[in-house]
Image (cartoon, rainbow, N blue to C red):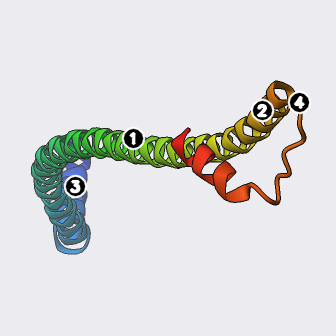
Amino acid sequence: MNINLTMLGQLISFVMFVVFCMKFVWPYIGEAMRERQKLIATGLDNAVAAEMKLEAASASAATELDDAKKQAAELIVQARNRASQIVEDAKGQGREEADRIIHGAQAEIDQEISRAREELRARVGELAIEGAEKILENTINQAEHSEMLNRLSAQL
């Protein structure tokens, strides 16, 4: 065999193989590469968009967190003010209750004093009669001399 003829056959076979690949294989490979390229580009675009959304969400979350902290601080201040107001109201109610109790006790004391005075007047009248009996050594009849005893107790 001739080496030139073999090389010519190999060259023809190689050219036919290249033409076959270019006509039947290469378009499918090129199409797959273009689809893959589009898919990668879309993925990169989506990644950039997601990164932007993440940054916006982070900024939004930070803003909402600051707002929540401010609202929490306001609520704490309001709660403290309300607690102070409740304490002041309770103190006022306590003072009112104490005043009411004091007035009630004072009224009761006044009643007891009046009752004691009346008892004292009655007892003084009895003691006066006993004293007068001993002085006069006569029995003074309380029924007969009640008007005089009433005047005497009124003077006391």
Question: Which circle's residue, 3 or 4, is located before the other in the chain?
Answer: 3
- Image depth: mark 4 or mark 1 in front: 4
Towards the viewer: 88 or 140: 140
Mark 3 sits on what residue? 14
* Disc 3 secondary structure class: helix
Mark 1 sits on what residue? 95
Question: Which circle's residue, 1 or 2, is located before the other in the chain?
Answer: 1
Question: Which circle's residue, 2 or 4, is located before the other in the chain?
Answer: 2
Q: CA distance from mark 3 to mark 4?
A: 171 Å
Q: CA distance from mark 1 to mark 2?
A: 53 Å
Give x and y (percent) for residue 30.
Answer: 17, 64
Which amino acid type is marked by label 3?
Phe
Q: CA distance from mark 2 to mark 3?
A: 165 Å
Q: Would you say 150 lies left or right of 38 here?
A: right
Is 44 placed above or below 73 here? below
Q: Taking the image as drawn, is residue 9 in sight?
A: yes
Towards the viewer: 153 or 45: 153
Task: Residue 35: name its quadrant.
Answer: bottom left
Which amino acid type is marked by label 2?
Ala
* Disc 1 secondary structure class: helix
The tag on residue 132 is 2
Which amino acid type is marked by label 1?
Arg
Is 70 placed above or below 53 here? above
* Disc 4 secondary structure class: loop
Mark 4 sits on what residue? 137
Q: CA distance from mark 1 to mark 3?
A: 114 Å
Q: Which image quadrant: the C terminus?
A: top right
Which amino acid type is marked by label 4?
Glu
